[in-house]
Image: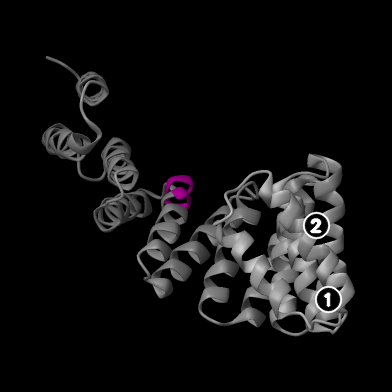
Amino acid sequence: MQTTSNLWEVLCRDFESERQVSRAQDCCEISKKFLSAARLVLRPDSVRMGDALEIVGDVFQAAGEYADAAKYFEEARETAERLGAHSSQARLSAKLGLLYERLGRHDEAIKRTQESVALYEDQRDYSQHALLLNHLGSIHRHLGDPAEAAQDYTRALEAATRMHGHNHPETATALNNLGVARTECRQYDEAESLHMQALGIREKTFGPMHPEVAQSMANLGVVYHAVGKYDQARAYYHGASQIYRSFRAEDDPELQNLRDNIAALPNDA
């Protein structure tokens, strides 16, 4: 008689073998068959049952079936919570936060992302903090609350600096995001300083011709545009455009946005 462990290994092996030879659009049905088989041999409140649910959620997410993926991740998260498996619960809550944002379910996205942050903090695991807090900030910005976003990005910056130091791309991302939020709050002096710091890190890390360098230059252009320093704004807009053209097509939204910004500058600037 096979043990549960052996049956689980057989299920996973058979699932992976079938998935590798199947078309992408068939993988969701294959994963549902895998889950049905898992429910027959695994206890509902078991680590492996949670793993099975997460695997199926991953398949549906990869297929773009976000609502179904969220359903499986939620069941897996509830299983992890009942088992006291806090690392798994934190990971699943983070996945759910991203999915709910894609689905436009912003309150749920905030709730699950905040839950993930708190669970990781309880375990003194700060490896995901900057990423999660940046995501939380992006939700609040999307909802039109730059002041709340700035608080999230400030925490993200603290987490990135603690984890990676002052001269790391993750730190630059947090600086950039906080700079955008400060611009939207009309705190232009602070926004300028933040974007300058991000630009310095990115140029040092990636060199002068990189999309992230262009992003920082474009954001500095926005700041200078807002405060009436039109010559500086134009210079940064053009610099960002030159870099983006090395990587993107002319109809790219970033390039179009820069063209619109340049056109909005006073002609005599």
Q: Residue furthest front?
A: 267
Callout 1 amino acid? Tyr
Q: Residue at x 83, y 76 (%)?
A: 224
Instruction: Give the vertical position of 51 relative to 265 (above or below).
Output: above
Q: Which residue is mark 1?
A: 224
In the shown orientation, is residue 135 left or right of residue 163? left
Question: Residue 127, percent across and down?
Answer: 64, 46
Q: Are marks 2 and 1 in contact (CB under 8 Å)?
A: no
Callout 2 amino acid? Gly
Question: Residue 167, percent across and down?
Answer: 84, 47
Secondary structure of the magenta portion, mostly?
A: helix
Whichever of callouts 2 and 1 sits on the residue coming sooner in the sequence is 1
Q: Which residue is mark 2?
A: 239
Viewport quadrant of the N terminus:
top left
In the shown orientation, is residue 136 left or right of residue 233? left
Task: Indicate the secondary structure of the residue bearing disc 1.
Answer: helix
Q: Nearer the viewer, mark 2 or mark 1?
A: 2
The magenta region covers 86-91
Using the rendered view, name the quadrant where residue 229 is placed.
bottom right
Instruction: Give the vertical position of 240 relative to 208 (above or below).
Output: below
Which of the pair 164/89 is nearer the observer?
164
Q: How far apart, in angstroms, are the residues tagged by discs 2 and 1?
A: 14 Å
- Res 175 seen here: no
Which of the pair 217/243 is nearer the observer?
243
| Pointer 1 local density, CA inside 10 Å: few below 14, some 14–19, many at least 20 | many
Question: In the image, is residue 72 part of the stretch drawn in magenta?
Answer: no
